[in-house]
Structures are given as C-alpha cells and as structure tokens.
Image (cartoon, grey):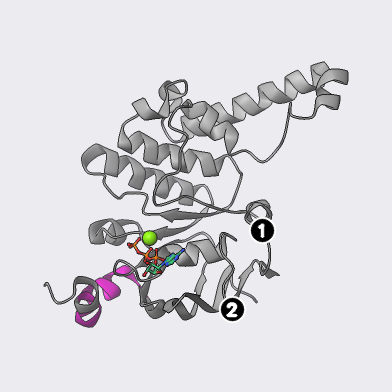
Amino acid sequence: MSAYLQVEGLNKSFGGLQALRDCSFTVAQGRITCLVGPNGAGKTTIFNAITGFLVPDTGHVTFQGISLDGRTSQQIVRHGIARTFQNLRLFVDLTARANVLAGMQDHVGEEPFTAIFRPFHTARALAAKQDAAMAVLAHVGLAAQADMLVRNLSYGEQKLLCIARILATGAELLLLDEPTSGLSGAALSDVMALLRRLQAEGKTLLVVEHNTRVVQQIADDVLFLHQGHLIAQGAPADIIADPKLAEIYFGGAI
Ligand SMILES: Nc1ncnc2c1ncn2[C@@H]1O[C@H](COP(=O)(O)OP(=O)(O)OP(=O)(O)O)[C@@H](O)[C@H]1O
Ligand SMILES: [Mg+2]
C-alpha cells in the first residue's frame, strides 16, 4: 500500500546552491509530523516542491497514490493539500473575512452570465460562501475579528488567520510553515491547541517548527533535514535527545 504522502528523491538547485539533495520521506495519514532542521536546511523548499510552487529538478511527490508531478499549485489544492507561508502573505488592507474568501476555490458571483440570469441562485451561493468563511474564522477563534482589517490584528491572530484561510480550501493535508514562530504565552498555546484540534478532526499536518518544546508537545513523528537531505526520522523524544542532531541544529552552541 502506498504512503499517504510520499516524497521521493527530490533534488533542487538554485544556481550553484543545492537546496534539496535526494530528499525522501513519507507522511502518515492523521498524524502531526514536524519537519525540523537548521536555517537554510531546505524546509520551505520542500513545501514549495510538494505544493507546486516550484518544480524540482528531479524526484516525485505522490499523494494518496496519485502522482502530483507537473501539477500546478491550484490543482494540488484541489487534490487536498494546502499550505501556509512563513511570511504570512495576508492582504493586510482587507478584513479577516475577505482574506478567507479570497482563498476559497469556487468563483461564485464572478460569472456575469450566471449572476445576471440566475440572481437568486447566485445570491444564495454567495450567502453560503460568506457562511463558510465565518465558520472557518469561528473554528480558529477569530469570529469576533471577522470584519477587522488584518493590519489591526495581533500577530497571533494573523497566524491563526493563515490557518483559517487554508481550512477554507477544504484540504485534508495541511502544510504549515512555522505556525508558531514569533509567538509566546497565550498566542502560542492557542495555535498549539488548534493544531491538536485539527488532528482530532481528521486532518493530517506537516509542520515546520523550530521550537523544541512545541515539537515535543505536538509531534507524532519528526523529520530532520540537513543541507537538503533527510538525515533522521523518528519519535520526538529520540530526535531531540540525539546529541549528533543537536550539534547540527545548534552548531555546537550547546
Ligand atoms: N528561490 C530561491 N532562489 C535562490 N535560493 C533559494 C531560493 N529558495 C531557497 N533558496 C536557498 O535554498 C536554501 C534552502 O532554503 P529554505 O528557505 O528552503 O530553507 P529553510 O529550511 O526553510 O530555512 P529557514 O529555517 O530559515 O526558513 C537556502 O540556502 C536558501 O537561501
Ligand atoms: Mg523556511
């Protein structure tokens, strides 16, 4: 039986820099897998390769037995994989609700023919879309902030909104690029609780995470990436306790 997500032999060079080298791993359905490794290890590049934001030089990605090779980022979302961005990429002059609506897949209300000749149908579909946007905002705890401009949200709220936006796609595999970076206290706990809740609801999560405490608390499996290559895979306690990996991660600082 094929793995839920299978990444096989990915290579990607940027000029003289090899960002991914023969990178292979699998992700199991229903689990939270943390992707860790030092800055520049290639974590975001892997997300870009899986989600169609870049084409690897060689290698294959298979999701639920279906090859994603050569598919566009929109096609990959339709297959059920959505990702957040390390640098958020929110529309800060729009409301939280508008950001969620912008991430939705359908084009309700955008087809003039249907909008003019089937106005009631269009109005109903638009109302349903608004309801769906409100539902994902409520799901991440942002119902009260729905009509606030994103620039007026706290950083923690913006991170939650990034997750709401990909939930609105209906994807079942969520790739989260540093969802807790820059957060502490209640904001950090809120994101961790949300990730656990999403898992309980049946989502599969692949999470880039630098905070060892967070990895320990949320990960079922850990993938350790170094110089574009997967050098270790295992349970969080085993990866975190490995002195060789700590040396690579912290450059001998501990
Ligand atoms: N589009 C690009 N053009 C040139 N070099 C790139 C590009 N994208 C990534 N790189 C380089 O590839 C390497 C891997 O980058 P990547 O962003 O994947 O690392 P990362 O593991 O996500 O790091 P961080 O923890 O800092 O986010 C880095 O040396 C980076 O500078
Ligand atoms: Mg990165």
Query: Left or right: 81 with respect to 38?
Result: right
Residue 236 covered by magenta stretch: yes
Front residue of 31/77: it is 77
Residue range corresponding to the magenta coloring: 234-246
Q: State the residue lying farthest toward the left.
A: 254
Image quadrant in which you'd find residue 244: bottom left
- Residue 173 screen position, x and y as percent: 55, 56
59 relative to 65, above or below: below
- Residue position marked by numbered label 1 in the rendering: 72
Image quadrant in which you'd find residue 162: top left
Quarter of the image for the N terminus: give it: bottom right
The residue lying at 61 percent from left, 44 percent from top is 170
- Tell how many labels: 2
On residue 59, the disc is 2
Query: Left or right: 163 with respect to 118?
Result: left
The residue lying at 59 percent from left, 49 percent from top is 171
233 relative to 70, above or below: below
